[in-house]
Image (cartoon, rainbow, N blue to C red):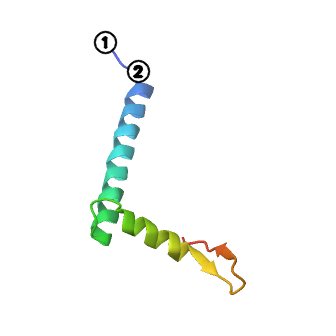
Amino acid sequence: MKLSIEAKVAVAVAIAFAALSLGAIAQEQSEHGTAGLSQMSLRGSDSSLSGHNGTGESQLLARY
């Protein structure tokens, strides 16, 4: 089976994207020292994203 040049380029781009994605995920995990998300870290991130304004209402704060 012979692949066209476009198919070869598409495969190369897909492999590069997968490799970069895995590298970014590994780097992110190593920076935070976690191998996965735990329930406590999820609760902590939820509480750090919402701010309270004294009237009992909470507002969502954006984190980038």
Kindly identify the amino acid type of the residue bearing the numbered disc 1. Met
Label 1 CA crowd tier, 10 Å (few <14, some 14–19, many 20+): few
Above or below, 54 against 23 in this view is: below
- In front: 21, or 11? 21
Q: Is residue 62 left or right of residue 20?
A: right
- The outermost residue toward the top is 1
Q: Position of residue 27 (x, y in %)?
A: 31, 63
Residue 1 is marked as: 1
Above or below, 9 against 19 in this view is: above
Residue 26 is marked as: none
Placement of the C terminus among the 4 image quadrants: bottom right
Identity of the residue drawn at 34% across and 57% down? 25
Q: Which residue is mark 2?
A: 4
Placement of the N terminus among the 4 image quadrants: top left
- In front: 57, or 4? 57
Q: Position of residue 57 (x, y in %)?
A: 70, 77
- In front: 34, or 15? 34
Identity of the residue drawn at 51% across and 74% down? 47
Above or below, 63 against 23 in this view is: below
Identity of the residue drawn at 27% across and 67% down? 30
Report which quarter residue 3 is drawn in. Answer: top left
Q: Position of residue 12 (x, y in %)?
A: 36, 37
Proximity of marks 1 and 2: CB atoms separated by less than 8 Å = no
Kindly identify the amino acid type of the residue bearing the numbered disc 2. Ser
Identity of the residue drawn at 34% across and 40% down? 15
